[in-house]
Amino acid sequence: MFDNNDLGFVRVGVGIPHLRVADPVYNIDQICTIIDRFSSEYAGVQVALFPELCITGYSCGDLFNQRQLIISAERELAMFITRVNLDMLIVLGMPILNNNQLFNCAVAIHRGHILGVVPKTFIPNYSEFYEKRWFASSASRISKQIRLCNQVVPFNENLIFRDLQSELRIGIEICEDLWMPIPPSSYHAIYGANLILNLSASNNIVGKSDYRRNLVSQQSARTICGYIYASAGSDESTTDVVFGGHSMIAENGMILAEQTMYQDSVTIVKDIDIQKLMNDRSKMNSFMEKRQPDLNYLTVDFNLRKYNDALSLKRKVDPYPFVPNSKKDIDVRCNEIFAIQSTGLIQRLIKTNIKKVVIGISGGLDSTLALLICFESFKKLNLPVRNIIGITMPGFGTTNRTYANALKIMKGLEITVREISIKKSCLQHFKDIDHDLNVQDITYENVQARERTQILMDVANKEGGFVVGTGDLSELALGWCTYNGDHMSMYAVNSSIPKTLVRYLVKWYSTNVRNNEIEIALLDILDTPVSPELLPPDSRDKIIQKTEDMIGPYELHDFFLYNMVRQGFGPRKIFYLTCIAFKGKFLPKEILKWLKVFYKRFFTQQFKRSCMPDGPKVGSVALSPRGDWIMPSDASYSLWLSELEDLY
């Protein structure tokens, strides 16, 4: 059904082979063992990276001046090319003699052909490093080509290896290159590389692994690329230095996989999302502005095989991308979110010189979070919390459960509590517009929503305050709000908080609040089905109008939203990722059904987002028309839905 290349993934592997210093025959044999694992156990590996000078060993010292070692390295490389004629890009490290100079090089091999040779640019010669004793920098090279294993190939530090089957573009740098103020990979990325390979032999001292990890993570983020780092294993340890095989696979600031040091011959394999990286680059238009010297880059084309391994994607797919997933960061992240929301509200209060807010409290999740933000904001401003006017407005669908929880929360926080029933005014309005009370249609529902908003607005006018909106990002994405009803306010504190995060924040607050009554109410609100409560409950006073039964689970819609807006993925890829993320929870047919609902609602409800109120941007996904999401209200969704045809 799916081809991973079409979805933008490339499978990469890092191999740290057993090694004998100055024994190319043994070393090539060990490299071949790992290549066999990449082509069998890890079926689908397309790019394989090995450490710096792995054919000879990095620690040869003055043996690099022995012609026998250099000749043996090339001879074993030739044997390797004959022996391993795979449709896999393999990058090995070895010393190469050219124009009377010895270079520390990376050799890129594909289908028995050498695509190119990349010499190391920055040659360390300090502390335990003596590389200038043996190796020349790429800056000293004379020729642009080299004859290696009877093949004439490019010899250049500025090579981009371009796969003609996908968007994959590969650049290479070697060890010390990464540690420079402007690493070569920075220029590689500007010239199009989206996957950087680093062959390294970085020894270990206390604290160095953390520094390396930060370098790799930050460089992958700065260049918006995948970054693969392969460092020499413990077999290189000799005389005064110890190596540990510290290797990493990173993607735009995230370490996807990391090799624990001091282990035997090991491999790590992950799938890099090249499409995601290219989408991020296209959004950040400043990234590709050409403000660098003309470096005469050379592009080398090759055809990398496609593979169909969609059922075993080798990367984590987080089903809840908006929710903090690290337990140790929960308090920090939630405090930060509350701080952003409350700071936005505080500044609106200060700059309007308004001392009161009005908020509708339903006993549901959204209004609860908005109230907690108001409460925290007023505490920071040293304003009396009695200036928060909470209004509960029972209607035809209000249950005793939500009504009671609304009162408990307001009274527990000691804000001003008001109760204004909307039943009589709605009945009068039905009469005025000649609407049959027994016809419980969209008019029946929206009359109630707009009546509540009118009450809030008018009370705000009377009290000299403004209305704080409670609607969240998920509702805006789906248009699940009444236009000029709950859709409208003077400041919407939840406008960039998706429903899954709303739930998470309320739960977090419940574990930190020092009021047992409030905690109990918050936990019951978390357990209450999401509902607008606009239709009458059943005979047992239970909610019958459950939002997620009508429009689909919010956990799915939030996943769809994140991957569409933040990642820029198309429908088929979103469907594929959702099936992986929610395997065992939702069937593919269910996912497909709700994904179609998502696209239809997202496109047809843009007009509500085009005039949404101000609100604080909290995360990387927001739908404000004032910069975050600019979209015509009348755009067609047929292109998106057509991509989902014939999936199931």
Image (cartoon, rainbow, N blue to C red):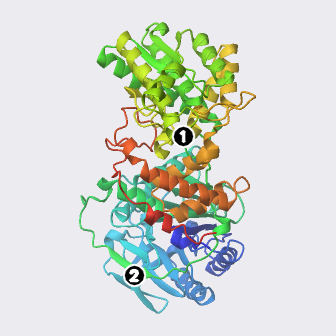
**Residue at horizontal 71%, vertical 32%?**
538
**Residue at horizontal 52%, vertical 11%?**
418
Amino acid type indicated by mark 2: Asn
Instruction: Name the residue tied to disc 2.
Output: 98
Instruction: Name the residue tied to disc 1.
Output: 441
Mark 1 closeness class: few <14, some 14–19, many ≥20 residues within 10 Å = few
**Residue at horizontal 67%, vertical 36%?**
544
Query: On screen, 377 above or below 611?
Result: above
Q: Nearer the viewer, mark 2 or mark 1?
A: 1
For the C terminus, the image quarter is bottom right
Residue 374 image position (x, y, % from top left): 48, 19
Asked if the residue under mark 1 is in contact with the one under mark 2, i.e. CB atoms within 8 Å, the reply is no
Left or right of residue 644, residue 171 in this image? left
Location of residue 119 (image quadrant) = bottom left
Mark 2 closeness class: few <14, some 14–19, many ≥20 residues within 10 Å = some
**Residue at horizontal 39%, vertical 47%?**
606
220 or 121, which lies in front?
A: 220
Residue 291 image position (x, y, % from top left): 24, 58
Residue 67 image position (x, y, % from top left): 51, 82
Left or right of residue 346, residue 50 in this image? right
Cα–Cα span, label 2 and label 1: 82 Å
Left or right of residue 164, residue 413 in this image? right
Element type where label 1 sits in the image: loop
444 or 176, which lies in front?
A: 444
278 or 624, which lies in front?
A: 624
